[in-house]
Image (cartoon, rainbow, N blue to C red):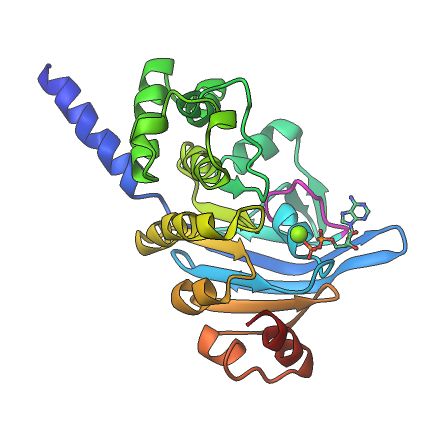
Amino acid sequence: MTAGETQRDAARHVDVDVLPAAGVEVHGAYKAFGALTVLDGVDLTVAPGTVTVILGPSGSGKSTLLRAINHLEPLDRGYVSIDGDPIGVRRVGDRLKERPEREILVQRRRIGFVFQDFNLFPHLTAVENVAAAPVATGAATRTRALGLARDLLARVGLADKADVHPRRLSGGQQQRVAIARALALRPSVILCDEPTSALDPELVDDVLEVIEDLASTGTTLIVVTHEIGFAREVADQVVFLDGGVVVEQGPPSQVLDHPVHPRTREFVGRVL
Ligand code: ADP
Ligand code: MG
């Protein structure tokens, strides 16, 4: 091994453990599907390197809000910015104008997304799933991307499953591969939409531990989950969304243990 290779290897290990962390701001997010208003003026501030847990009943707009953050769901009014940079739109005078698709794609690489149902490529092995985006975007050569992917799989406890296809992995293992994949482009923010709700109960903790590990290294995380224990231990702020409105937000000790709003009280009472 040459000195150059040793240095590159050292850099690679830094890559895996520390991600850049960005702040997220949601400004007056409004979205309707036909006559149904799904987000009705959501404002939210997420400081860099913090964990925000979003709670709320089914249909309250949680997934739509996450999808709006990476511009999978363009807003009707309002906008989302990451470190002050509006996502998917640009200010022109006092109006917002949609950015060209290629700019949106570049911006989206700053945002990792972990879905409820994993969404792995079934025909690729675990390591190929994790390496796919860096190779496709030209962020890394195939050799380097595969090396980084193996390191990321080791980080989520799956070093020995790198060459296995998703169908031979448990749901919890598939979700950990999906988390490694979300990390591969070194995102500044990671969004998780009910990452454990498709899992058998005994597999939930392994996935939550991986997310907790990310949180402890200072990654900015926004997690939709009903796992109250996780919220209590890991969240810096908990946001309760109902009917497309932020009903209550604050530290977990306030929102979970001393909710002020009757709707929060009723919801927390049900899921605890
Ligand atoms: P949650 O994740 O909190 O369960 P969602 O954000 O998925 O809620 O959905 C909020 C509401 O918006 C639901 O009533 C849902 O049926 C509706 N909805 C979501 N996406 C669409 C869509 N693409 N077209 C029409 N209605 C939608
Ligand atoms: Mg949802």
Write the start and end of the magenta stretch as one range: 69-76
**Residue 55 to residue 254: above or below:** above
The residue closer to the viewer here, 25 or 199, is 199
x, y (%) of residue 126?
43, 25
Give left or right: position of 30 versus 187: right
Picture residue at 68% right of the left edge, 45% below the top: 92
Q: Is residue 71 magenta?
A: yes
Q: Is residue 211 magenta?
A: no
Prevailing secondary structure of the magenta residues: loop
x, y (%) of residue 131?
42, 23
Picture residue at 36% right of the left edge, 27% below the top: 161
Give left or right: position of 101 versus 230: right
x, y (%) of residue 125?
45, 20
**Residue 131 to residue 201: above or below:** above
Give the quarter of the image for residue 260.
Answer: bottom right
**Residue 96 to residue 241: above or below:** above
The residue closer to the viewer here, 98 or 263, is 263
**Count of all numbered marks drawn on residues in the image:** 0
**Residue located farthest toward the right when viewing the structure as drawn:** 35
The residue closer to the viewer here, 118 or 36, is 118
Give left or right: position of 45 versus 138: right
**Residue 200 to residue 178: above or below:** below
x, y (%) of residue 64?
69, 51
Give the quarter of the image for residue 29.
Answer: bottom right
Question: Which quarter of the rendering shows the C terminus?
Answer: bottom right
Question: Which quarter of the rendering shows the N terminus?
Answer: top left
